[in-house]
Image (cartoon, grey):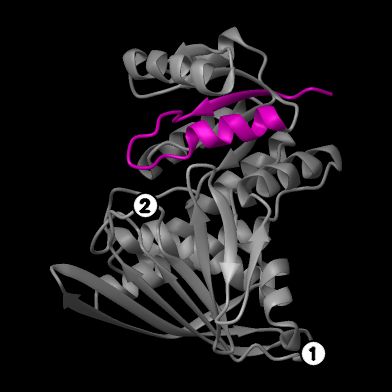
Amino acid sequence: MTFKVAIVGPGRSKQGTGPFIARSFKKLGCDVQAVVSSSLESANKAVTDLKNEYAINCYAYENLETLLQNHSIDIVAISSPVYSHQLHLSTAIQAGCHVFCEKPLWWSSSEIITESDVQTITNKTTELVQLCSTNNVLLQLNTQWPYTLPIYFKLYPQLKDQQAIESFSMWLAPQSQGSSMIIDSISHLMSMLYSLVGNGKINNIESNYHTADEHQDLQIEFDYLHALGDTRVVITLSSSDVFPKPAAYAINGLRADRHVELPNYLISLRSSKDQLPVKDPLVCSIKNFISTIHSKTSSDEVALIDGMTHLAQIYQAVTQH
């Protein structure tokens, strides 16, 4: 079966992933039929770019509902700005489309100030997840970092014999600044924790801002309690306009840095002693999504709901610190 795909947010502005998602779906045998952007002008530009760069022929729309009325779509891939996700998610799910969504799943323009606000995030996410179940569609996040783990464990084979992951650290460089760095980055961190130790609870959130060279760094620490034990987690966020973005993570203090070789965007992980190539994580993520549709497996409801709850908890704790 050839899946018919629509891309919401197909442009490159602010390092958008839309064009690369479209390219990857095509590479995996899907038919990218149409795109939706904030205006018809930007949608038409995206159509031209996709045709010229990836030989993708598709139609332009400025409204997802109109697109779905004119095309029989199986999959909607959402890579638009996060504040528009909730509307696009609801529209796609109610139309019976499977959804591949950029992180985080959604976010509100309202501030998350109290525990009641966190509960509202949880409740609204639960409603979206239940809507997927009602309409028998798959909802999955674009989680790319976990697909680097097989290479990481080749760099550090000694970790395979250790049952306890006592600490996990991550270093990311979002383009955003201040509290927006939390929204842009925490879902990456949580996807790694879910892959390594499963779902859990967050306790003892601490945070500090550090200002240096006109850039503000944010360090967040917390305990992650899970079925396998307790992991101390630290994430350091440093706003940066540099591309490719510097990024790294460490398990039990053993660090691997991501290296990206342009212009072909070849990805590898580096330890202090070795460097190994990584299969394109975006292609791996989409391939997993397509395989999950074929297997008729349901959405990972716990991970989706807990992921948004944890993001809200961390955001609330840091911004109200």
Marker disc for residue 161: 1
Q: Earlier in the sequence, mark 2 or mark 1?
A: 1
Q: Range of the magenta residues? A: 1-27
Quarter of the picture holding the C terminus: bottom left
Q: Secondary structure at mark 1?
A: helix
Up/down of 284 relative to 32, above or below: below
Q: Secondary structure at mark 2?
A: loop
Quarter of the picture holding the N terminus: top right
Does 227 sit left or right of 182 as displayed? right
Check disc 2 and give the amino acid type: Phe
Callout 2 crowding tier (Cα within 10 Å): few <14, some 14–19, many ≥20: few
Marks 2 and 1 close (CB-CB < 8 Å): no
Callout 1 crowding tier (Cα within 10 Å): few <14, some 14–19, many ≥20: few
Quadrant in the rendering for residue 58? top right
Does 237 sit left or right of 171 as displayed? left
- Spatial CA distance of label 2 from label 1 is 36 Å
Tell me, yes or no, if residue 97 can be seen here. Answer: no
Up/down of 78 relative to 119, above or below: above
Residue located 49% across and 34% down the image:
18
Q: Which residue is mark 2?
A: 243
Q: Where's residue 159, x and y in %?
A: 72, 86
- Front position in the image: 99 or 253: 253
Tell me, yes or no, if residue 265 can be seen here. Answer: yes
Does 21 sit left or right of 311 as displayed? right
